[in-house]
Image (cartoon, rainbow, N blue to C red):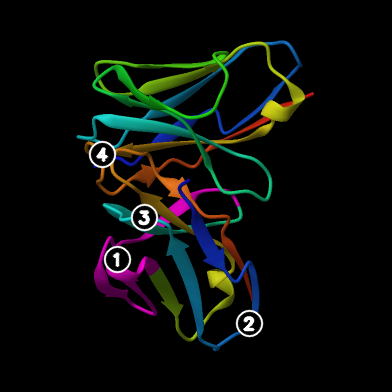
Amino acid sequence: GIQVEQSPPDLILQEGANSTLRCNFSDSVNNLQWFHQNPWGQLINLFYIPSGTKQNGRLSATTVATERYSLLYISSSQTTDSGVYFCAVEFGNTPLVFGKGTRLSVIA
Amino acid sequence: ETGVTQSPTHLIKTRGQQVTLRCSSQSGHNTVSWYQQALGQGPQFIFQYYREEENGRGNFPPRFSGLQFPNYSSELNVNALELDDSALYLCASSLTGAQEAFFGQGTRLTVV
């Protein structure tokens, strides 16, 4: 069946460090999004990136659709980056399927 | 342009009761999806509405039902609440499928 796998499940960083989060998916996609879930539960859109590379400030993302993975890069991490990062994918006519997330803790 | 808004933000209900959660979609969006997120898990798809018609349903029992109104706002109704229904319920809107989805802040439901 459809699978979205994220790694690592947990990550602890010192403030200022860089990190890479990975999302593997099992089929061709027509939508891939990265979200940051804040402590109050809201999913904040980071990137809509079914293919290619995008950058937004300290964050960037790359999706290699032919190899079925996406990467989220966080540079110069800050404590406000803490939270859970989700990758979500649409295959064909399916709704967004979420991975289990990566829980990031940035320590001052 | 207003974002996706959900109400209420928090709710406590007793097992066996019924609950209605509401969602106003982002301006111009005609597709609304509902998700359930249990503690420590990723969101799970409940169902989607497109132009007032159900347009897909996840693995949830019939006591989970919904509506979409002409202004594209939506309701999620859950009957005969069970303790396991305690979760964060998230609403997302998009302009048709395969487009970027935007989420509301969620409704945290506790069933006691």
Q: Nearer the viewer, mark 2 or mark 3?
A: 3
| Disc 3 to disc 4, C-alpha distance | 17 Å
User: Which residues are the magenta region?
Assistant: A40-69
| Residues beneath discs 1 and 4 located on the same chain | no
- Magenta-drawn stretch, dominant element (helix, strand or loop): strand
Q: Mark 4 = which residue?
A: B97
| Horizontal arrangement in the rendering, residue A51 relative to residue B61 (left or right) | left
Q: Split into 4 quadrants, where in the image is the C terminus of chain A?
A: bottom right
Q: Which residue is mark 2?
A: A13
Between marks 1 and 3, how big is the CA–CA gap?
9 Å
Q: Is residue A49 left or right of residue B76?
A: left
Q: Give the letter of the chain under mark 3.
A: A
| Residue B95 disc label | none
- Does the segment drawn in magenta span residue B94? no
| Lower sequence index among marks 1 and 2 | 2
Where's residue A5, x and y in %? 52, 60
Bin the neighbour count of mark 2 within 10 Å (Cα to Cα): few under 14, some 14-19, many 20 and up: some
Q: Same chain for marks 1 and 2?
A: yes
Between disc 1 and disc 4, the foreground one is 1
